[in-house]
């Protein structure tokens, strides 16, 4: 079964829970349109729908915005299952979920979170970080144990939790970044609900269900296919 829809925010489509009147159905392939292709595969350096729509299902972020919240401001857990904030607003301690694995089978730990946020907040000279400016308050990212990550800030920042919920702040594998900090510009490997299958330039992007995903109730879909079509008339024809 295939489910064709027009240009869609796939992050929300895949993550939204069913309402009380609906019962989620498992299976099928979601097909959606994206008007542009990814300039690179690295969400840390890009800011277009052409990246976040086809690639976000391969990854997780520390926190996310509740897709059912109409205000778009309610922060909910993703890889971080809980967090505390010091009274002075300078220390954010987040506890990570246990049992999360990258698509290569290796466990995700606080070391991977630190490596990812060091890349975002303190990029090396040859690395582009689109959202570096949002994290100038960070003084240091610490990893007291494998399941805990601590952000120490130079000054209080009211928007800090919301910033951690950016849909582009994917958690990358520390060992890969240590070998090649730009590896993710041309490769895909995350912890998300879908594994990468293929990208055919000028045509489509395909992901398939991750059978080892940490949330055993998700995803409902067997896979998805993003069609890269920029022409409005061609988009209409594609969904007829």
Image (tube, helix red, strand yellow):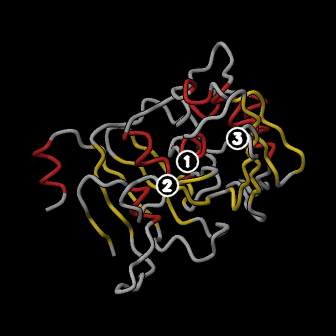
Disc 1 + disc 2, Cβ < 8 Å: yes
User: Looking at the rendered structure, which numbered label has been put on residue 236?
Assistant: none
Question: Circle 2 sits in a helix, a strand or a loop, which is it?
Answer: strand
CA neighbours of label 2 inside 10 A, class few (<14), some (14 to 19), many (20+):
many
Which mark is first along the chain, 2 or 1?
2
| Image location of residue 14, percent across then percent down | 44, 64
Which mark is first along the chain, 1 or 3?
3
Tell me what residue is drawn at x 44 percent, y 44 percent: 52
Q: Nearer the viewer, mark 2 or mark 3?
A: 3
Q: Vertical placement of 114 versus 237: above or below?
A: above
Q: Quadrant of residue 121?
A: top right
Q: Quadrant of the C terminus?
A: bottom left
| Image location of residue 27, percent across then percent down | 44, 77
Question: Circle 1 sits in a helix, a strand or a loop, which is it?
Answer: loop
Most extreme residue toward the right is 145
Residue holding disc 1: 165
* Distance between mark 2 and mark 3 Cα atoms: 21 Å
Tell me what residue is drawn at x 24 percent, y 43 percent: 229
CA neighbours of label 3 inside 10 A, class few (<14), some (14 to 19), many (20+):
some
* Distance between mark 1 and mark 2 Cα atoms: 6 Å
Q: Nearer the viewer, mark 3 or mark 1?
A: 3
Which mark is first along the chain, 3 or 2?
2
User: Looking at the rendered structure, which numbered label has been put on residue 65?
Assistant: 2
Nearest to the observer: residue 19 or residue 55: 19
Nearest to the observer: residue 9 or residue 233: 9
Q: Vertical placement of 160 versus 223: above or below?
A: above
User: Looking at the rendered structure, which numbered label has been put on residue 89?
Assistant: 3
Nearest to the observer: residue 118 or residue 239: 118
| Image location of residue 35, percent across then percent down | 27, 41
Residue 78 is left or right of residue 229, and the answer is right
Q: Vertical placement of 173 versus 95: above or below?
A: above
């Amino acid at each position: 079964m295939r489910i064709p829809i027009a240009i869609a925010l796939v992050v929300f489509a895949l993550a939204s829970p069913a309402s009380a009147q609906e019962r989620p159905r498992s299976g099928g392939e979601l097909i959606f349109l994206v008007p542009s292709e990814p300039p690179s595969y690295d969400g840390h350096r890009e800011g277009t729908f052409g990246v976040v729509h086809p690639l976000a299902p391969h990854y997780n972020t520390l926190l996310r915005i509740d897709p059912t919240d109409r205000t778009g401001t309610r922060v909910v857990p993703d890889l971080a299952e809980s967090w505390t904030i010091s009274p002075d607003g300078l220390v954010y301690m987040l506890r990570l979920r246990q049992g999360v694995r990258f698509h290569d089978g290796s466990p995700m730990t606080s070391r991977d979170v630190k490596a990812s946020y060091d890349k975002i907040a303190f990029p090396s000279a040859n690395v582009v970080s689109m959202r570096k400016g949002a994290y100038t308050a960070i003084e240091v990212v610490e990893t007291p144990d494998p399941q805990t990550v601590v952000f120490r800030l130079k000054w209080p920042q009211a928007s800090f939790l919301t910033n951690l919920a950016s849909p582009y702040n994917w958690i990358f594998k520390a060992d890969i970044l240590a070998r090649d900090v730009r590896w993710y510009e041309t490769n895909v490997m995350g912890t998300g609900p879908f594994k990468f299958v293929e990208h055919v330039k000028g045509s489509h992007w395909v992901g398939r269900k991750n059978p080892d995903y940490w949330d055993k109730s998700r995803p409902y879909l067997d896979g998805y296919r993003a069609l890269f079509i920029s022409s409005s008339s061609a988009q209409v024809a594609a969904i007829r």
